[in-house]
Image (spheres, grey):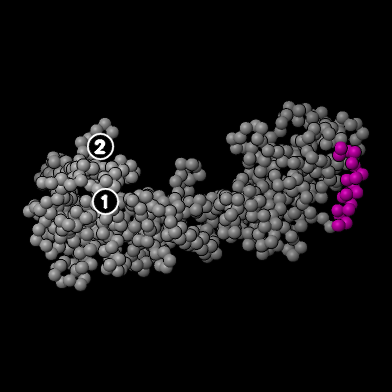
Amino acid sequence: METKAFQAESKKLLDMMIHSIYTHKEIFLRELISNASDAIDKLYFRSLTDDSVGLNKEDFFIRLDLNKTERTITITDNGIGMTGEELEQHLGTIADSGSLKFKADNQLGEDQQIIGQFGVGFYSAFMVSKRVTVYSRAFGTEQAHKWQSEGVEGYSIEETGDFSDLTKFGTKIVLELMDDSEDENYSEFLEDYRIQHLVKRYSDYIRFPIQMEMSHRKLREGTTDEYDLEVTLETLNSQVPLWRKNQNELTPDDYHNFYQEKFNDYMPPIAYKHVHNEGAISYDALLYIPSKAPFDYYTREYEKGLQLYTNGVLIMEKCADLLPDYYSFVKGLVDSEDLSLNISREMLQHDRQLKLIARSIEKTIHNDLIKMQKNEREKYEKFFDAFGTQIKYGVCSDYGMHKEDLQDLLLFWSSHEDKLVTLDEYVSRMPEEQKEIYYAAGSSIAQIKALPQTEAVLAKGYEILWFTIPVDEFAAKNLMTFKDKAFKSVTAADLDLNTEEEKKALDEKTEENKSLFETMQKALNGKVQRVTLSSRLKSHPVCLTSEGDLTLEMEKTLNAMPTPEESKVQARLVLELNPDHPVFAKLTALEDQEKIEKYAKLLYNQALLMENMPIADPAEFSSLICELM
């Protein structure tokens, strides 16, 4: 029997295939099952117009047989089969499977899909096998042929009488597994449960039955503790994927059960979407929003992504490119026959098709979230409680590039009836004279409500958004405006709520006490930019405000990050005094400069406490209180 050499390019590619292209050796089974499905597809397509085939769709099968003694795995199909010349062409020359040509020549429709696009998948068998033997007999021919190879050294082809006990035509592939080593356990592929797991994971939705004899323990009749081993032929795959079924035939329970089983969640999802898209890109998808965030969701360990299938064959467990980061909470899958796969099914080309699918999915998620927000508000608020922070991070990411797409999804707690509101709801209630969207940031709603800076805004009848998580204020800074209304912190030094007459009166009073304020500012030794009078205070004697974009809350958030001391940021603070408070009357009556300085430190520390900020010297603060009392 003559041994033929692979072409030089094929030999090099085969060596690369065995050692580097595929990430996991286990995918050899996926590739061989996919090739068997292709072969059956070709014959099934022929049977639609050729009565001589004599087979109906339910007559086709893929059979797996394990032999632990011989250490072999056998994959048999009753598909179209191959002649000797076709074995030479498809297996002797790598990357020539003929699948694309067959599909193009026969103009296959949706029901006649061909999975394989490149012949290289077959050679993944050599990652686990020391010898691969292929027996094949083409439909309509009398002679079977045998192709055999031990890898890169070459292959042989000869006529054979040995074909298969299961079928008169088709293909039988026998893999002789490598011996186990310290690093590799090839024997695992001879275990029923392992093969069953791999079929369920990668090939569950191949549309022809994948069968294998399975062993089960059965209680021996008339005994209570003696068992016999029963062997039955079982179909391992589901065949028809849920996402390919008619939506009218499915119930919410069908979708929920699929989600909980497929994605290992003990709770049903908040929402799901069944997508069938045709057009520039065709795909089916099932998208789910979990009821709550996974325990590792806001950690670096969390991996986003949708399962990616091509014609029901799992290609990637998590395709991150299908989801933007701000929708990383979405779980589900996408199945498309339009994707281009290069040398192996694991190596997806980042081409136009993938980008089109990703863009379409992003639009679908956004539209469904808006619909939920308008029609199922309670459900939407539950969703936002779990994943709203991620949406807000999305507003901040990529220099605010996505803010226009995400701003309508945002919810914030509000002083209006103490509930969550959208930005659109806030703006729709703004009085005509109100020019800005007011917000106040803090660690909790209770703490924010106690801020002295909120008094004047609320007294005007203006609504305030309560920013209770650190990202809220950064999101507002990135948005800058919503419907031409700028965001304004109630702690901003330039907050303008006064009439012209009120401003004039305040300026005059500030000028009258200029020397007092200079003394206080000097006593605070650079901690504040200036000391001035305030029109925003009603019942409180003092507060801190900030100049510029950096607020006290933002300072706290940024400095809480692991950064060197020299990189710490500091807000430009202003100490504001209430001109109508008895404390200010006391200050203006003081003539002792040293006492004024002590009052300045005391009031500054009081303002820090109201902002939930630490005091640099608690002992000094305590002494000042005792002394001045």
Q: Is residue 505 magenta?
A: yes
- Quadrant of the image containing the C terminus: top right
Residue denoted by label 1: 94
- Structural crowding at the residue carrying mark 2, measured as other residues with C-alpha within 10 Å and reported as few (<14), some (14–19) or many (≥20): few
The amino acid pointed to by label 2 is Asn
Vertical placement of residue 162 versus 597, above or below: below
Q: Left of 451 or right of it: where is 284?
A: left
Residue at x-position 62% and y-position 32% = 564
Give the Cα separation between the discs numbered 1 and 2.
27 Å
For mark 2, give the secondary structure: loop
- What percent of the width, then of the height, locates residue 207? 26, 60
Judge by depth and name the residue closer to the eye, 227 or 343: 343
Residue at x-position 33% and y-position 65% = 245
For mark 1, give the secondary structure: loop
Most common SS among magenta residues: helix
Q: Is residue 156 magenta?
A: no
Q: Would residue 446 be seen by someone viewing this image from the given angle?
A: no
Q: Left of 94 or right of it: where is 467?
A: right
Residue at x-position 9% and y-position 52% = 160
Give the quarter of the image for residue 168: bottom left
- What percent of the width, then of the height, locates residue 145? 12, 54
Residue denoted by label 2: 185
Tag nearer the camera, 1 or 2: 1
Task: Tell whether label 2 touches label 1 (CB within 8 Å).
Answer: no
Chain part drawn in magenta: 500-518
Residue found at the very far left of the displayed protein: 161
Residue at x-position 48% and y-position 45% = 297
Judge by depth and name the residue closer to the eye, 280 or 523: 280
Judge by depth and name the residue closer to the eye, 433 or 18: 18
The amino acid pointed to by label 1 is Ile
